Amino acid sequence: MNNNSDPMFVQYADMDFTKALPVKAVPALAKLQAAHGGKSRITMRVDTETLAIFKARAEMSGGNYQTLMNEALRQFAQGQTLAELVRTTIRQELAHV
């Protein structure tokens, strides 16, 4: 994955961010992020093969592997099984027909 994989990269590629501040250094932005961010930064070790699978699926779907991993963790935490996920997906697809 490189910078060019981000659809917004081209739009901001030529901008100078050398004097940019982190969000926590701008109180208004920090407050906004806390109110609407809802995510936490963590460091986690993942098997190379597992990471490769998520990256490949993200590339095929045009998404982000971190978003896919987050969704998989959410489903696991909620106790949603693969069978339930398949049933839900089929029901949603049949409703569109």
Image: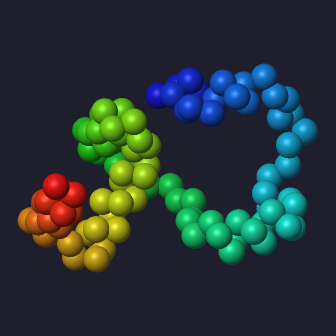
45 lies above or below 91? above
Quarter assignment of residue 41: bottom right
Q: Report the residue at 18% width, 63% height from top.
A: 95
Q: In screen coordinates, is 82 left or right of 13?
A: left
Which quadrant does the C terminus fall into? bottom left
Location of residue 71 by image quarter? bottom left
Residue 59 shows up from this direction: yes
Residue lying at 31% horizontally and 33% vertically, measured from the top left:
60
Name of the residue lying farthest toward the front? 97
In the image, residue 42 sits, relative to residue 65, either above or below, namely below
Q: Is residue 46 left or right of residue 9?
A: left
* Label total for image: 0
Instruction: Answer left or right for 73 relative to 20.
Output: left
Would residue 57 appear left or right of 37 to someone viewing this image? left
Give coordinates of residue 90: x percent, y percent: 13, 60
- The spot of residue 11 in percent (x, y) is 70, 28
Q: Identify which residue is drawn at 56% across, 65% down.
A: 39
| Residue 18 location (% of width, % of height) | 86, 34
